[in-house]
Image (tube, helix red, strand yellow):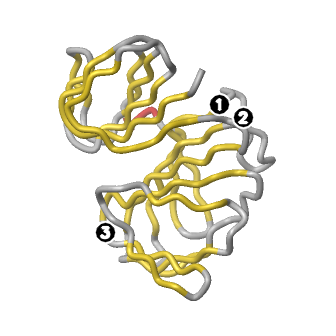
Amino acid sequence: MTTLPQSSYKTTTWKGGVTRQIFISPADGDLSARQFDVRISSAIIDDVQSDFSDFSGFTRYILPLEGEITLIKDGRHVTLSHNALYEFEGDEKVSSENTQGAVDFNIIVRHGISVEVGIMEDAAFTDNRRTIVFALEDCIVEGEALSKHDTALLDEPFSLKGKAVIARFME
């Protein structure tokens, strides 16, 4: 197991705030060139309104971590839940209205890459699939403490005590 404290996340600015890259695959992937299979990040959104970038050929998942986020797509307002990832296609025109300083969690997956994503609490995993655990609260992963918003990368069976976003690569 490899643990990544949030202090190790690569931080960059974007037009609406600051983003922290948690994980990218392959490791030398390039977000701006859209040359990656999976990217996991968290953004601090300074603007109360923003437009999502085009990620044609990708599926996106988003979860508010702090504050409130409402997506606007096809004229509909979708208030995001703090307890479920919201899925949409990267080529959809989506904007958001949110509380200033809201923090989100994002997963972007290239079409053709199979990844299971969800929120889990107090669970055990018995196979050797590559798994990314993003702690939504202080957790214990395979006996090791993981602070809120830190990440663990695993390639072996493990147990989770606490609540986390889980992304598991299909074999």
Residue 163: percent from left, percent from top: 24, 40
| Residue at numbered disc 1 | 25
Left or right, 87 with respect to 136, comes to right
State yes or no: discs 2 and 1 in contact (Cβ < 8 Å). yes
Residue ID at (77%, 47%): 34
Using the numbered discs, state the Cα–Cα distance from disc 1 to disc 3 in whole angstroms.
28 Å
Using the numbered discs, state the Cα–Cα distance from disc 2 to disc 1 in whole angstroms.
6 Å
Using the numbered discs, state the Cα–Cα distance from disc 2 to disc 3 in whole angstroms.
30 Å
| Residue at numbered disc 3 | 67
Left or right, 86 with respect to 39, comes to left
Q: Is tag 2's residue or tag 3's residue first in the polypeptide sequence?
A: 2
Q: Quadrant of residue 92?
A: bottom right
Tell me: residue 119, above or below residue 46. Answer: above
Task: Say few, some or many: other residues with alpha carbon within 10 Å of mark 3 (under 14 / 14 to 19 / 20 or more).
Answer: some
Left or right, 81 with respect to 35, comes to left
Quarter of the image with the C terminus in it: top right
Tell me: residue 69, above or below residue 31. Answer: below
Residue ID at (47%, 57%): 62
Viewer-proximal residue among 164 and 126:
126
Residue ID at (46%, 12%): 128
